[in-house]
Image (cartoon, rainbow, N blue to C red):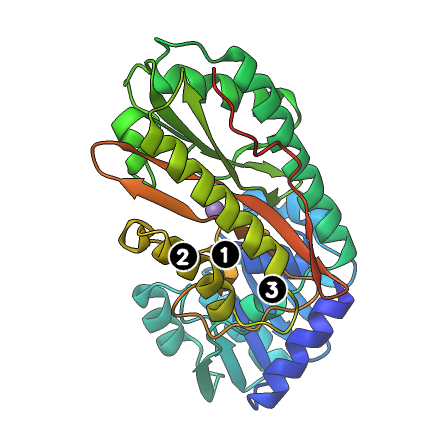
Amino acid sequence: MNNRLKKFREALSKMDLDAAIISGRANTFYLSGFTGDTSFMLVGMDKVWLIVDFRFTIQAKEEAAKGIEIVEYKESFAQTINELLSQNKIEKVGVEGDKLTLTEYENFKEKLTKAKVLKNIGNILERIRMVKEEDEIERLQQAVLIGDRIFDHIIKFIKPGMKEYEIAAEMEYQMKKLGAKGPSFDTIVAGGPRSAMCHGTASDYAIKKGDALVLDFGVIYRNYCSDMTRTIFIGEPNDQLKKIYNIVRETQQTALDSLKSGMSGFDADKIARDIISEAGYGRNFGHSLGHGVGIEIHEEPRLSMKSKDILANGMVFSVEPGIYVEGLGGVRIEDMVVLVDNRPRNLTTSTKDMIII
Ligand SMILES: [Mn+2]
């Protein structure tokens, strides 16, 4: 935690702030190790407080990193934070504009009478979180490994006639059996024409011969997320689906082979987008190539047409091109990679050969 706090404090200093109030759950966990909710953190230049309510006091004492002072709030969070500001002569305070509700912000403005400045720190913690530490990469690898094991299992389990939700239920049961906390997002099992919906969460559709089946899922393991997608076929697919599969597979491989540190998220996305466009499916690839994965399922950096992020060693992100044709179906293939020594190392090991059940 010390290294994280150091980076964060440097960023606060640059913004001419004495402290910041952290309200985002992922950020609170990142800086303290505390996994509970309804808490606030006050990060000063030499002290850190975790302010919780009675329900979380014991948990906070157990989980919070050494050196963090646990404070149980009295009348209200704002009043307790204001007392801490007063006792420690903190006047210039940052807040997370993306995380606070308007009501919380108005309340802080009114009740934090000791704060002369209340300034939005934006996403500076999210920027720090982009580059993962060794321990984080290890957890992410473990989470990905559970995903690979679930894929191994589910391709043996799936039979024509099964409903999407039966498949999703089996996957989520296996997640917990393998020690994960649960899914990192609503498990996507989308068969036949439904596979053309990029985020087709499992429905009562029964899969049948000739269907493409998109399986997009992830787990939360020791507070870190995984994310992977494979598209399989129920019986022999038609020629167009086969063609689409091969384009997506080649695109994904080319993107993986071309990625390197120093490249922009825009350029990474463009490599994939150009190949798919040249194949005549540009309009059918309507989402971005990838996103960072960590404590949250979707985080920075972004690999997209709008991205200004520069990829760097230690970043972990997905590479997931797709082609979706309304009425026919869709294909998406997604791996998670980490940049090490300027090159991507694939965390996902499940096969990308065409699987026909
Ligand atoms: Mn993803």
| Residue 82 place in picture, x, y as percent | 51, 74
The residue positioned 55% from the left and 75% from the top of the image is 20
Could you classify mark 1 by the number of other residues whose Cα lies within 10 Å: few (under 14), some (14-19), or many (20 or more)? many
Residue toward you, 173 or 275 = 275
Q: Amino acid at mark 1?
A: His
Say which element carries label 3.
loop
Pick whichever of labels 3 and 1 is earlier in the sequence.
3
Task: Judge left or right: residue 1 versus residue 94.
Answer: right
Say which element carries label 2.
loop
The residue positioned 32% from the left and 72% from the top of the image is 106
The residue positioned 50% from the left and 42% from the top of the image is 249
Note whether residue 35 is visible.
no
Give the quadrant of the N terminus.
bottom right
| Residue 63 place in picture, x, y as percent | 70, 47
Could you classify mark 3 by the number of other residues whose Cα lies within 10 Å: few (under 14), some (14-19), or many (20 or more)? many
Q: How many angstroms separate mark 3 from mark 1 (CA)?
A: 10 Å
Indicate which label's residue lies in the foreground, 3 or 2. 2
Q: Does the closest atom of ligand 1 sit within 8 Å of the Cβ of label 1?
A: yes
Pick whichever of labels 3 and 2 is earlier in the sequence.
3
| Residue 355 place in picture, x, y as percent | 51, 23
Q: Amino acid at mark 3?
A: Met
Indicate which label's residue lies in the foreground, 2 or 1. 2
Q: Which residue is mark 1?
A: 291
Q: Which residue is mark 3?
A: 130
Look at the numbered discs 2 and 1 and tell me whether their residues touch, using CB distance below 8 Å. yes
Residue toward you, 92 or 338 = 338
